[in-house]
Every structure is written in structure tokens, then in C-alpha cells.
Image: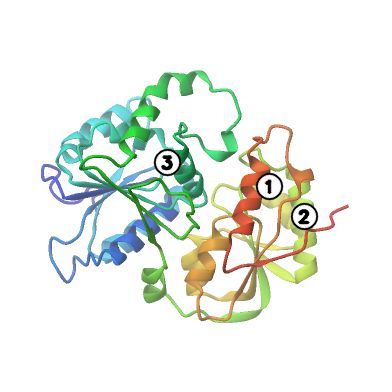
Amino acid sequence: MSPRAGNPGTAPRTLAFVESPVQLLNVLEWARAQNLRPRAEPGAGFTLVVLSPNDPMTRGQLRRMAELARDEGHEVRWEEARAGAAAPFRTIGGLASLLRGAERVVMGDPFSRYVQLLLAVTRAADLVVVDDGTATMEFVGQLARGERLVRWHRKGGRPGPRDLLLAPVSASARRRLTPGGDRRVEVFSAMPIADAPAGVTVTANAFAWTRERFGPPRVTRGADLVGTSLVETGVVDGDRYLHAVGVLAGTHGASRYFAHRRESADKLHRLAAQTGLEVVRPDLPLELIARRGPIGRTVLSFPSTVVHTLPLALAGTGVRVAVCDIDPAWLTSHASPRARGFLSGVTGTARGADRLATLNTA
């Protein structure tokens, strides 16, 4: 199958840009909420553009999600957007005519420099941001406060040369994502959005497509633990994290550890050796893996997107989702000053998850 489907000279009404499997999943959820069913109504779909990263795990999950999107009748265009220094120029140049002709642009990561560059090209009046995890909460808050768009785990640090070079692009993207005139902005999210700017439409993601497409799962008696990439992003100390995972698994009788796609192989090898947990590297976003089953009766997690999304995806199955706070002592000296408050907010606003007592890891 060719990675580029359809006629590249025809501009679809809606273009969607994704860089991760979760973003692609949430675009499919948005399409379901919009009742875009191309198999039933030819021409009702959209073109979904995958701006592929280089990470093998992410690419593998994206390939699987792209197959699901094609199964739904949507057109998928795969771009090797990071294959060498010239790739961004080639990718943006190849998409320019589609961007200029699109009436609506859907994106999964407004913090992405790639997406910000694409926003500078498009004339679309309708802009839609779908969830890229908990970062959506920070994006909406920054937009409401008129702040520059910075990922939460980098906030508080000094801008680097690349940040300064691309600052005008970021500022332009923030203006484009601010409603005004005939420009409409929607946020499609499973996250708790409390401070959306005036004019931004917030639509709830209930994971209806996931529940229709998969499951219900077989529920086992045990517990499963969900991994996080907080070590890889420099927020949490690696040794502290591994110790906490062992304590959490032992306390609740967990036997499997569902790895985050960004977790390093070395860390996962250490984790398996130290805790005895079976490490599972999912080939799809965890919401789909859990819905497909089998899944433990209790799913344990540190603060992350899944404490908001899994209760929705697993509604009616009897599975309990429980979240364990990050002890401030686990944070690295390089962690953003924003990290502690942000992670606590992720836990505190998880409406469908139980909050566990702080671990004693002494």
C-alpha cells in the first residue's frame, strides 16, 4: 500500500495532522463525534496526515492506528517528516496547496514546531485541537493567559537558541489559535478544561468510537500497572521511579507493566529485573489495549493522561483505575518549577479514578 493515498492535487475540506498514536486515536474519536462516516457517505471523510517521528515504537503504533483509520474509510497520508535535514522543507512544500485549500485544520499538538509552521501556511477558519494527553490542559491555560506556548515540563527554563529562532512562529501560532473575527477554535478533549478562553468551544471526548470498536474486555482478577515517561523527560529521578514502581506493584499485587512508548529499553530492562513485573510494550494506545483486553480488575498509574481516559474507555466494565501521586522527593533538580503543581493537578482532577495514599518508599 502506498503511504500517500488519494489525489495530492485535490484539497480536502478537512486536514488533520498527527505525530503520535494517541493524537490519531483522538482524531478518530473527533470524527465519530462529528458523524464523519465516509463508508456510509462518500466524501464525508477527511485527509489525515501523519507527520512521522523517528522513534521505532511510536512509528509502529502509528502504522497500526493508520490501518484502523483506513478501515474506517478515511484517507491517510504518511509523511517521512523527519527523514533528514531537508525533510521539513519537503514536507511543508508538499502540503502547501492542501493547507491553503483546507477549510478546517485538526491538530493533536499545538506545541509542535511542525504544526506551528503548518498553521502559518493555512487559511482555514476552523481550527480544532484534539487531545495530546495532559498537555491539552496546559495549552488551554496558556492560551487563556496570553502566554507563549511552552510544554509544561520545560516551563521555567531559559529559552535555547532554537526557541529564540522559532519564537515568531510560536507567537504567530498562538494568535492563530485565538478565536476572533471569522476564525473558530474548538478543543476536543477528555481532560477537565476549566479556564478556556472566551470564544473557544470545548467538546467532551467520551471515547465513543473506542467503546464501539473494541471490547468489552475480559477482566482478570489481578492488577496492571501503567508506565510513564517522566524519567525520560527529566522530571523524575530514575532510581526513585523504579523503587516506587516496585513498592506500588508489591502493595497491590500487580503482575504486568504496560510501558509508555517513550520509555527507554535500558530502564525497562532494569525495571523487569528489579520488580519481577512482566513488561508489555503495547502496539496500540493503552485505551485500545485495555478495551480489547484482557485487563486487570485494577489499573494502577502515576499522574498521566490515562487516569482521565481509561475510566471513559472502560466505562461499564467494572475495572477500577487508581492513581498514585508523585512524591516531590522523586523530582530531579532539573525538573521545571511547574512540575509539582502540574502533576498534582493531573491527579486531583481525575474524576473517574481513585486516588491512592502517597507511597512510603523510604
Residue type for callout 3: Pro
Q: Report crowding for label 1: few under 14, some 14 to 19, many 20 or more residues within 10 A (C-alpha).
A: some
Residue 230 seen in the current view: no
Q: Is residue 66 left or right of residue 146?
A: left
Q: Where residue 139 appears, x then y in whole percent? A: 46, 43
Residue 161 lies, with reference to residue 3, above or below; the image says above
Decide which of 316, 146 is in the foreground and name it.
Answer: 146
Indicate which disc residue 53 carries. 3
Indicate which disc residue 244 carries. 2
Disc with the residue nearer the chain's start (3 vs 1) = 3
Q: Is residue 98 left or right of residue 286?
A: left
Disc 2 to disc 1, how far (Cα)? Answer: 14 Å
Q: From the viewer's perspective, is the residue at label 2 or at label 1 nearer?
A: 2
Residue type for callout 2: Ala
State the residue at coordinates (77%, 63%).
Answer: 357
Residue 339 seen in the current view: yes
Decide which of 13, 76 is in the foreground and name it.
Answer: 13
Q: Judging from the image, what secondary structure is the residue with disc 1 in? A: helix
Q: Is residue 264 left or right of residue 313?
A: right
Q: Where residue 245 appears, x then y in whole percent? A: 74, 57
Q: Judging from the image, what secondary structure is the residue with disc 3 in? A: loop
Q: Where residue 175 appears, x then y in whole percent? A: 34, 33
Disc 2 to disc 3, how far (Cα)? Answer: 30 Å
Q: Is residue 328 left or right of residue 86?
A: right
Where's the N terminus, which quadrant? bottom left
What residue does disc 1 label? 267
State the residue at coordinates (38%, 48%).
Answer: 108
Residue 246 lies, with reference to residue 263, above or below; the image says below
Q: Where residue 11 appears, x then y in whole percent? A: 13, 45
State the residue at coordinates (24%, 67%).
Answer: 35
Q: Judging from the image, what secondary structure is the residue with disc 2 in? A: helix
